[in-house]
Amino acid sequence: MTGTPFAVFVAAAIVILGVFTAVARSRSATVDYAKATRLRLLFFASLGAILLFFLVLTLPGLPYPVEASTPDRVVHAVGKQYAWSLTEGPGPTLAAWDREFSPLVSVPARTTVEFRVTTLDVNHGFSLYAPDGRLVAQTQAMPGYMNRLRVSFDEPGAYTVLCLEFCGMSHHRMRGVVEVK
Amino acid sequence: MPEVLVADSGVYIARLTRLTLTWVLVALVLFPILAVLGFLMRVLQAGFFAALPPEWFYAVMTLHGLGMVGLWFVAGMAGISFLLSRYVRPTLAVSWIAFAATIIGVVLLLAATLVGRLGVGWYFLYPLPFHSGGTWPAWATASLFAALAIMGIGWTLWAGDLLWAIARRYRLSDALGWQYLRGSGTPEVPPIIIVATVSFIGVLAGLVAAVVILVLVAIEQLTTGFTNDALLIKNLTFYFGHMLVNITMYFGVAMVYEILPAYTGRPWKTNALIAASWNLVLLLVMFAYLHHLYMDFAQPQWLQVAGQVSSYLISVPAAVVTIFSTLALVYGADTRWKLPSILLYLGVMGWAIGGVAAVIDSTVMVNSRFHNTLWVPAHFHTYYVMGVVLMILGTVFHLASDLSKLPESAALTRTIAVTVGVGGYGFLLMFYLAGVAGVPRRYAAYPDEVARGIMYARASLLFITVLLGGALLYIWETGRRCVRALP
């Protein structure tokens, strides 16, 4: 998933570097304004076509849940400096955090799991890392809001939940585990 | 050609020169300090000095981010003020007020981060400043907001005065180039006036959001029973932050419009295309910030789509007008390749490359893999370090050389260009590769799942050292010219 955008970026960067180098080394010439205008128009049309192509290609892939469908499982993910609570029932409140907090939840593979993500204090970033270290999916955890993230895990294993929105001193230590069976 | 102001300008220009060089010297002192803080962050991420408590990393990160964003904004403002003096007369006293406000703000931020260990990141996302978890005291948060308020007032006055100076000479519609859109082309205005007008309107529009944030946060802190809406504050925060960063880049572009023609021997005249593109930028920049909130699923979906469309669209006027025109200006032009022209040209190239990375990340589908990974600092460091910073440094060297009359050493110019180019892009590549590998940004240390981040951080240290070497050489060469040029 990340390989394609990186390849597009590298290709574009090489083209830009090549064009800037060629122009800087170009030999003395007078400006042909008519030709420059035609070239600019061509550049404008090409850029417009490329952007339109990527808009049409990518907009159908928005990661937001479709209201009409129902998930197979629901997991409540609640962030609090500096831990994730992952439960099948409603997440803990601030007062009951120590009693109800759970850093681990189990879900079946190849089913649609909806993570209902919120926070009890500051903004956090709920992210799922596969056992091989790939970033699988993410959404933000915001005070007063519940963000719904749907994921279907193809492979079983322990998926780590890390925080992807800076939340304070132990931001990098905030974690949870989703065990996919 | 647009008429240049020369009458009765001797004393004014001498005072403006002193003021501008003062700004530049302060920037040349702060720049390496803030850059070394960035280097220190990569040292810690590389696994060295592991005994240092993480709150120091986050305090340094906050100072580095806030410092760099503020530094290049004021350096851009100061540079533009000087270049605008060819056409209009800003009030010098207002710029001095902004200078004093900036210095006070810097002192407060230094105290908050280095003494108070405030670690909130450069956009201090609400409500984090009020949830320190015992890391920083309440006075550090108060110091942050006091710094922002003081600098905000100073910068609002500054941008307002510069806009007023333009309005005293040109009608606002002319300063925005609408006469070119009507097909008349008179009165003639140079491109820098149009870009500056768009930028100052943008600055004021961004600062309005900052004021709203400060007021809302103050109400919550000073009253009971009122809690701010986190999504609203997030929208306001990114609207303000994105605007400030983008406007800084526009300052750099305005400098390219004004300075590069002196090295290519070809004029850069305003036409309908330039006018149309910058008016379009003024409109689109208000909405492009929405791409920062793609992962906030509670945001209405039509705003997410609007964010991707406006982020894509805003790249068109930049690419078709500024980048294409830069290439047309240089192509076959017998350009004098001196340090200023090299840095300005490299700056436009960096802006283009960083722009591609930004457009890729502004694709919602891609953002769900890249958001808050190291791809984010990768792309914004590309159009900052290798973009607008080079444009500003090129302009400053142009002014300092012009005022000091000190000749340029070809060997030093080559050394600076090569070290900055190789060091800069090598440093960025490590960010990009780590981002593609899903390594999170803003981690003081990497847990096992993303331990590959350590390898990229270690490799980047070599490139940053080369980059810093080039930067220090530049600072020495420019600093001695500025000191020589002080009236």
Image: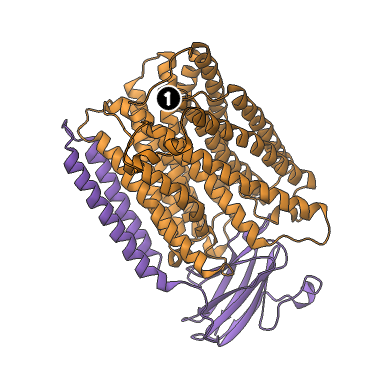
Q: Secondary structure at mark 1?
A: helix
Q: Does B466 sit left or right of B241 as displayed?
A: left
Output the chain of dot 1.
B
Instruction: State the residue in front, B288 or B171.
Output: B171
**Residue at figure coordinates x 32%, y 50% from the top left:** A13
In the rendering, at what x and y percent does residue B309 appear? 42, 61
Q: Colour of chain B?
A: orange
Instruction: State the residue in front, B102 or B440.
Output: B102
> Total marks drawn?
1
In the figure, B435 relative to B420: above or below? below
Instruction: State the residue in front, A54 or B115.
Output: A54
Q: Residues within 10 Å of mark 1 (few under 14, many from 20)?
A: many
In the rendering, at what x and y percent does residue B256 appear? 38, 33
The quarter of the image holding the N terminus of chain B is top left
Q: State which quadrant residue A104 falls in.
A: bottom right
Instruction: State the residue in front, B102 or B32.
Output: B102
Q: Does B412 sit left or right of A42 as displayed?
A: right
Q: Does A55 sit left or right of A69 as displayed?
A: left
Residue B91 visible to an observer of this rendering: yes
Q: State which quadrant residue B325 falls in.
A: top left
Three-letter amino acid code of the residue under disc 1: Phe
In the rendering, at what x and y percent does residue B29 appear? 56, 27
Q: Chain in purple?
A: A
**Residue at figure coordinates x 78%, y 60% from the top left:** B226
Q: State which quadrant residue B70 falls in.
A: top right
Pointer 1 residue: B397
In the rendering, at what x and y percent does residue B160 appear? 58, 34
